Amino acid sequence: ENSIQLSNYNRSVRRIQQIQAIYNQAVGTYNLYIKEFNAKADGKKGKAKTDELEKARMLVDSCETLLLNSRFHPQTIESARKVQQAIFEFQQKIRKAY
């Protein structure tokens, strides 16, 4: 039984790490959009492309889906909640950018 519990715990930890990696990718993509947006605001011609913003939105949405469709070991629930809160706040930030 201990082996099963440990296996479930490890699976939960790996899932949270996977979600965090996707989240970090979304933040990096969003930062590219902001960098381009700021460059355009500083006088460069053209309009900032929203491709990176849309990609960030899709990535963070996939994080949310993974969170909602995953079962977490009781010892990892708090970590999952923290990731979920960060995702929610980031989604709000992306929505404001549109």
Image (cartoon, rainbow, N blue to C red):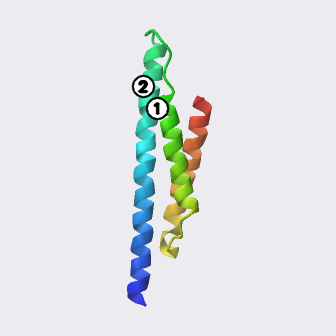
Between tags 1 and 2, which lies in front?
A: 1
Identify the image quadrant of the C terminus: top right
Spot occupied by residue 4 in the image (x, y as percentages of width and height): 42, 84
Q: For the residue labelled by badge 2, is the local secondary structure a helix, a strand or a loop? A: helix
Q: Residue at x 40, y 59 (%)?
A: 17
**Closer to us: 81 or 55:** 55
- Classify residue 84 as left or right of residue 45: right
Give the vertical position of 66 relative to 93 (above or below): below
Residue at 58% in and 42% down: 91
Q: Which residue is mark 1?
A: 52
Residue 82 spot, x, y in % from top left: 52, 57
**Can you identify the residue that label 2 sits on?**
35
Q: Quote the CA–CA distance across marks 1 and 2.
A: 10 Å
Q: Residue furthest bottom?
A: 1
Name the quarter where the N terminus is drawn: bottom left
In this orientation, which residue lies closer to the viewer: 12 or 59? 59
**Front-most of residues 78 and 50:** 50
Q: Secondary structure at mark 1?
A: helix
Relative height, residue 76 to residue 65 (above, below): below
75 and 97: which is toward the camera: 97
- Tell me the amino acid under the disc marked 2: Lys
* Amino acid of disc 1: Glu
Question: Which residue is depicted at the point 39% across and 65% down?
Answer: 14
